[in-house]
């Protein structure tokens, strides 16, 4: 084979890889609406000005439906971002934190603790939602490899036929291999998303303007004589998060949002013991939740009580914002005119959502409009 032929093959191979990579951007599903618009939440993180976020929040829907960074900004001028994803396991939180540190230098990390004690079989759907809109980096590749390893271990335990890891790996790195069958489902947003500004006005937090009455176990935090066992892999990655925070001079606080579905006193005891072991503060908003002003009949958007609605989010955000400012030395960013304007744009858009919600349901009068700084 001549040098010219080798060069042509190399150029052709490179062109194919480029087409596969950018083709995947079009074929990837765009999760942009509803209660978990992960495409916008993850993509929006990269639109935040570098080194402008002082509080980073990690976790599942129990975090991004529970905390509104605009409230912390309005009250104290402190910047934050909820870098969450659906069913975010501790290994995802770990790699999200590593990824975030490439762009931001947070002074505080707030970690939602549900998945220290909760978790099911590996779920490709949730893995995809977490990984697909991360930028290609060593951290994304590390997360993908972790997903594949965990899936392989689980399949071996189930006695299922093993799928070759390299095929799964390429599926993640080149999404067109996974999503090519969507060719007849493509819509305008699949093409337009990549040319539009991807900032997320509520900074990763997702307020949901629906409300319902909780219909299940109203005594879900009844005292338990024992604690649950924290999963080994979750414990391992929690330890990694601790070390990563320490090595970067970042404070860490653990939080369990008000959520009556996947939580109970036995889980609380397990996480409280872990927090004591590592000397990390732990706020559980389910313990004597009435003292925080929470209400089972007004604060959830589903009858299962799994996630907070915009009203419950406002309550938790108010309290957690006060706690952060009272306990951590984080200066306001209000002397940066460009940053003030950037955050005020988010408040303006959020207020529009509140006003629209009020028009359709007087319930939302209890969600206040935010003041621009």
Image (cartoon, rainbow, N blue to C red):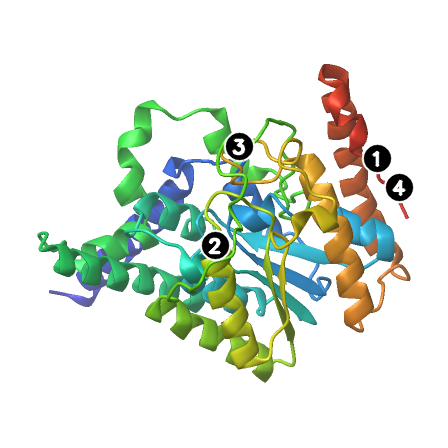
Residue at screen point 33% across, 54% down:
173
Callout 1–callout 2 Cβ contact below 8 Å: no
Residue receiving disc 2: 134
Marker disc for residue 290: none
Q: Is residue 67 visible?
A: no
Viewer-nearest residue: 242 or 181: 242
Residue at screen point 84% across, 40% down:
370
Callout 1–callout 4 Cβ contact below 8 Å: yes
Callout 2–callout 4 Cβ contact below 8 Å: no
Q: Is residue 71 left or right of residue 244?
A: right
Residue receiving disc 1: 369
User: Real-space Cα distance between discs 1 and 3?
Assistant: 31 Å
Q: Earlier in the sequence, mark 1 or mark 3?
A: 3
Q: Which of marks 1 and 3 is in front?
A: 1
User: Real-space Cα distance between discs 3 and 4?
Assistant: 32 Å
Q: How crowded is mark 4: few (under 14 residues within 10 Å), some or many (20 or more)?
A: some
Residue at screen point 46% across, 32% down:
190
**Secondary structure of the residue carrying numbered label 4:** loop
Q: In this view, does 4 lie to the left or right of 355?
A: left
User: Real-space Cα distance between discs 1 and 2?
Assistant: 32 Å
Marker disc for residue 371: 4
User: Real-space Cα distance between discs 1 and 4?
Assistant: 7 Å
Marker disc for residue 192: 3
């Amino acid at each position: 084979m001549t040098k010219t032929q080798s060069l042509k093959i190399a150029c052709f191979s490179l062109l194919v890889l480029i087409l596969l990579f950018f083709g995947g951007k079009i074929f990837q599903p765009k999760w942009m609406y509803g209660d978990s618009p992960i495409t916008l939440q993850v993509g929006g993180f990269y639109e935040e000005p570098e080194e402008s976020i002082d509080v980073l929040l990690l976790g599942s829907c129990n975090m991004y439906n529970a905390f509104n960074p605009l409230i912390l900004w309005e009250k104290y001028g402190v910047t934050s971002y909820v870098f969450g994803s659906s069913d975010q396991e501790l290994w995802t939180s770990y790699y999200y934190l590593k990824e975030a540190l490439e762009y931001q230098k947070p002074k505080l990390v707030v970690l939602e603790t549900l998945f220290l004690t909760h978790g099911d079989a590996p779920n490709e759907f949730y893995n995809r939602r977490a990984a697909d809109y991360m930028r290609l980096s060593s951290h994304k590749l590390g997360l993908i490899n972790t997903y594949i390893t965990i899936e392989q271990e689980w399949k071996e335990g189930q006695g299922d036929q093993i799928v070759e890891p390299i095929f799964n790996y390429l599926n993640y790195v080149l999404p067109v291999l996974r999503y090519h069958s969507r060719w007849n489902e493509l819509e305008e947003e699949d093409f337009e998303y990549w040319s539009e500004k991807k900032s997320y006005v509520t900074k990763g937090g997702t307020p949901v303007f629906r409300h319902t009455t909780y219909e299940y176990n109203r005594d879900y935090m009844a005292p338990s004589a024992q604690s649950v066992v924290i999963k080994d892999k979750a414990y391992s990655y929690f330890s990694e998060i601790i070390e990563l925070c320490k090595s970067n001079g970042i404070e860490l606080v653990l939080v369990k949002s008000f959520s009556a579905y996947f939580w109970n006193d036995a889980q609380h005891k397990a996480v409280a013991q872990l927090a004591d072991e590592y000397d990390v503060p732990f706020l559980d908003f389910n313990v004597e939740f009435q003292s925080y002003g929470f209400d089972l009949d007004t604060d959830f958007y589903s009858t299962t009580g799994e996630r907070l609605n915009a009203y419950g989010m406002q309550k938790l955000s108010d309290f957690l914002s006060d706690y952060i400012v009272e306990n951590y030395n984080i200066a306001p960013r209000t002397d940066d005119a460009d940053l003030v304007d950037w955050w005020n744009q988010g408040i303006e858009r959020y207020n529009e959502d509140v006003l629209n919600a009020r028009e359709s349901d007087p319930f939302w009068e209890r969600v206040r409009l935010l003041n621009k700084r």
